[in-house]
Amino acid sequence: MNSDFPRVITLLRKERGISQKNAAADLGISQALLSHYEKGIRECGLDFLVKTANYYNVSCDYLLGRSPEPAGKTIQYDDIPDFDPNNKEKISAGGVMASFNKKLVINALSVLFSLVQKTGSGTVLKEVSTYLMLAVYKMFRVVYSANPKNDPNFFTVPEVIAAGSSSAAMAICEANASAAAKGVSVNGGDTAKESPDTLITANSLSEEYSGSASSLLNVIKNSEARMHIINNSDK
């Protein structure tokens, strides 16, 4: 089948709180065979793929990792909510992809900040916010350097150390946010509170955030596709 199918069917079963024994019985196969499917030891046929899609009420494209959304929807530019209330932004020739990615990122960040607030932790909010500001800073400096006539004195941190210093600061933010999210206090700060509000699935995202969830799910899919390319390049 492919590498996504075993992961997705296992994730769906656990998200729904269904035991492997019960899922196998409902799907008309043995538990041993379902275990092999979930571990990627054996590949299923088309009939089982369709039956599984119907059982979990998702699309075959989602089961195969072709779409990040359970319904299998392919996101289009007009599907993404526009955060410009006056719709003033004009798309220039060749700028469609830039506008598309901008809307993806803005909507994904909107969902992310909503989820961060649900953790109930000021530490997580502070560290996530600082991390993202540093990321914007780093990329702004990259764009700024595109024209050699731009004055380097625009920044107080010299270019020779800016990239390394900002990456180090981001690593600290990530570590602090991760610790607080997992209930470990950093320098006496608060930690995330475990609650039903922080239980996240693809379905819960789609139901609560509607169009914005598509942006986040596609950002995740695109990011992991880039990471797979990097990891496979070393083989």
Image (cartoon, grey):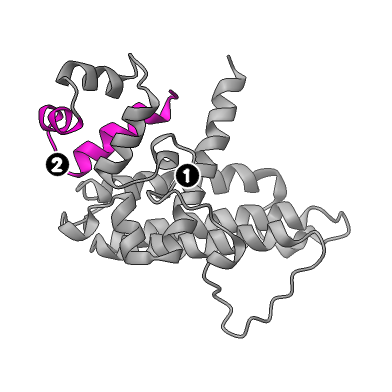
Closest to the observer, 141 or 18: 18
Amino acid marked by disc 2 = Gly
Q: Above or below — where is 21 with respect to 91?
A: above
Residue displayed at 61% across by 63% down: 77
Closest to the observer, 7 or 49: 49
Write down the quadrant of residue 52 in the picture. Answer: top left
Q: Assign the C terminus to one quadrant of the image.
A: top right
Residue displayed at 45% across by 65% down: 211
Which SS class for mark 2? loop
Q: Which residues are magenta?
A: 1-27
Q: CA distance from mark 2 to mark 1?
A: 23 Å
Q: Above or below — where is 87 with respect to 53?
A: below
Q: Assign the N terminus to one quadrant of the image.
A: top left
Write down the quadrant of residue 123 in the picture. Answer: bottom left
Residue 17 marker: 2
Q: Residue furthest right?
A: 149
| Residue 42 image position (x, y, % from top left) | 34, 15
| Residue 66 image position (x, y, % from top left) | 49, 39
State whether residue 104 appears in this view: yes
Residue 67 marker: 1
Q: Give the crowd class for mark 1: few <14, some 14-19, many >=20 residues within 10 Å.
A: some
Magenta: predominant secondary structure element?
helix
| Residue 22 image position (x, y, % from top left) | 11, 32
